Amino acid sequence: MKLNLGCGAKKLAGFIGVDKLQAGATDIVHDLNIFPYPFPDGSAEEIIMDNVLEHLDDVIKVMEEVYRLAAPGALVRISVPYFKSNSAFTDPTHRHFFTETSFKYFSVDNPLNFYSAARFAVLKTELIAKTEYRDAKHFFRNLLPGKRILNYFLSNIYDEIYFELRALKAPAGPQE
């Protein structure tokens, strides 16, 4: 099973769309702030959360629920507004902000991983400067050389941050 949590109107082939509102892509109506989600433990081989996690009440509880749903080795793809972008702060429904290291707190080797028992390997972290914006500010920003270095000193170089995580779970043993 593949889940698109907080799908809105974005239908993805092969994914079950879950959202608190009945939108164009919603297969199952469920508020992601209410636990547990209506799926069995270890049932998802892939989970996508595209610009939804920043809206939810408790990031740690959501990630623990994602971990519960994830099959061993499941891929989890998360896109959120980057904390140094205007879009992170302009939407009054955003409750959380994310950096390149936000998901290291769920890593086995992070000494601060005691907030949760959910464990993920961070496979990829990518800063994204969206190209679909049509205004001059974004056009010229996307032409800048050395954006990674400039990002340390300037805001609004990147719009979004994308993470790929792998659920670190042992396969279930044989049933007796």
Image (spheres, rainbow, N blue to C red):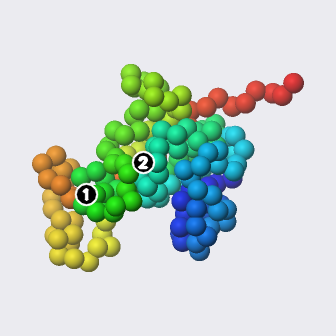
Q: How many marks?
A: 2
Image quarter where the C terminus lies is top right
Residue 78 in percent (x, y) is at 46, 51
Residue 137 in percent (x, y) is at 17, 71
Q: Which residue is at the far right?
A: 176
Kindly state the secondary structure of the residue where label 1 is placed: loop
Q: Which residue has dot 1 on it?
A: 85
Q: Which residue has dot 2 on it?
A: 163
The part of the image, by quadrant, that contains residue 22 is: bottom right
Closer to the chain start, of discs 2 and 1, is 1
Residue closest to the eye, 122 or 31: 31
Give the residue at x 54% y 32%.
118
For marks 2 and 1, give the CA distance: 17 Å
Count residues near mark 2 (Cα–Cα under 10 Å), then give few for <14, some for 14-19, many for 20+: many
Give the residue at x 54% y 59%.
6
The part of the image, by quadrant, that contains residue 68 is: top right
From where the camera sits, is residue 50 visible?
yes
Relative to 82, is 152 on the left or the right? left
Amino acid found under the numbered disc labelled 1: Ser
Mark 2 vs mark 1: give the one in front: 1
Amino acid found under the numbered disc labelled 2: Phe
The answer to whether mark 2 and mark 1 are in CB contact below 8 A is: no
Residue 151 in percent (x, y) is at 18, 50
Kindly state the secondary structure of the residue where label 2 is placed: strand
